[in-house]
Amino acid sequence: MDVQFLGGAGEIGRSAILIDESLLLDFGMLTDSPPQFPVRTPSPDAVVVSHGHLDHVGTIPALVSGDARPPIHWTPPTYELAMTLARDTLKLHGGTVNCPFTETNVRRVTQVSETHGYRETFEAAGYEVTFYNAGHIPGSAHVLVDDGDTRLLYTGDFHTDDQRLVSGTTARPDADTVICESTYSDVDHELRETVEGRFVESVETTLWEGGTVVVPAFAIGRTQEMLLVCEAHDIPCYVDGMGKEVTEMLAQHPEFLRDADAFRRAKSHARFVTGKDGQRKRITDQKAAIVTTSGMLSGGPAMTYIPEVRGNPMNKVTMTGYQVEGTPGRDLLETGSAEIDGRIMPVSARVEQYDFSAHADRGGLLAYLGDYRDTPVLVNHGDRCEAFATTLREDGYDATAPELGETVSLQ
Ligand SMILES: [Zn+2]
């Protein structure tokens, strides 16, 4: 089995792994300006997708251009998330070089889509493929590929701890080689209960003092996790941005949620913002949490909320995830001001950071790989892949970090 890394090797974003020039695992987009795509667009016989985040599905529609119609295999939530993201990319970049597909391509994806549940083995390009719950976001999967001789386990993004939205991964299928993500290979997360406890106390204090809290959150996964936290602690909240649509969609797939009843309660607890008649400006003086995209303040309704709440030190902005360098969210955390809609804005409202990560940390990665001690490991999806591979080698593993474009032959 020959495995080529077309993206996501030594980097986060544009994940793409091609097996024997025939089976493609993921085809993502790296959000940057301008966005970046996998190093080439192959013509696979079939495509298998691990989960519905932009860095894993963002370039999928480009695979069904010309005469190419490879079947695309994924779980039902991953399919729906991929379609939502593709339409969003068309809206943002359609008709420019920053969008490598057209509306026609996106429509074609619906014709070649084949959905599967966890642990239902299916055939793709002559390989036997099985999804296992990866505990990252709803529908996220570890992908096991078996060609009859070699079993390759591609972890995709995963979490070993429970989140309110999804349970942590427990599946450890037998494999001959593991491709392992390493997003947080050099980080030890605080316990989720501790993070949540600090977040809840901070929000409650602000609301009690009469302030408003803007909670920037990624649309997929994080928005729903924050709605579950708000419901569990009876924090009044609004939800806005693409996270609304994603919340509605996930409610249709209860089997991919950790607790479908809690999700239903969280969905009805949150007030969905329509944005009509100046509603956004009006609710910024409510004693409530406003959960909204974008997670790094680079767009979305947060662009309306931040200017409204920024002047009052009683208000708060609580970031809920990692802030990439150069984003307004990172600038706001580090300097107390950010460029919002082209204007540099100082923010008097208090700004805080909470790490609600959906990835395994160093301890989680090592615990997971502890079940694959005698299995060769290929480290990808991280900024420090080589360093983590070295750590694993020092611990007795056969571990390497492939480079972008590199082909690795597996036995
Ligand atoms: Zn992900």
Image (spheres, grey):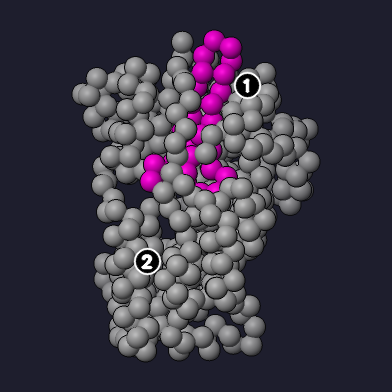
- Can the viewer see residue 109 in this picture? yes
Report if residue 152 lies within the magenta region: yes
**Residue drawn where x is 62% and y is 21% of the image:** 128
Q: Quadrant of residue 230?
A: bottom left
Q: Nearer the viewer, residue 158 or 330?
A: 158
Q: Quadrant of residue 342?
A: bottom left
For this view, does 19 lie left or right of residue 194? right
SS under mark 2: strand
| Dot label at residue 128 | 1
> Compared with residue 153, is residue 2 higher up or lower down, i.e. above or below?
above
> Compared with residue 356, is residue 241 higher up or lower down, i.e. above or below?
below
Q: Are the residues at dot 2 and dot 1 in contact (C-beta closer than 8 Å)?
A: no
Q: Which amino acid is tagged 1?
A: Glu
> Compared with residue 208, is residue 61 higher up or lower down, i.e. above or below?
above
Q: State how many labels appear.
A: 2
> Compared with residue 256, is residue 20 higher up or lower down, i.e. above or below?
above
Q: Which secondary structure type mostly characterizes the magenta part of the structure?
A: loop
Residue 320 in the image, given as x and y percentages of width and height = 38, 63
**Residue drawn where x is 53% and y is 43% of the image:** 140
- Can the viewer see residue 380 in this picture? no
* Label 2 C-beta lies within 8 Å of the nearest ligand 1 atom: no
User: Which residues, given as a range, are shown in magenta?
Assistant: 134-161
Residue 303 in the image, given as x and y percentages of width and height = 48, 75
Query: Badge 2: few (under 14), some or many (20 or more) residues near its Cα, within 10 Å?
Result: many
| Dot label at residue 319 | 2
**Residue drawn where x is 53% and y is 54% of the image:** 259
Q: Nearer the viewer, residue 411 or 250?
A: 250
Q: Quadrant of residue 392?
A: top left
For this view, does 205 lie left or right of residue 28? left
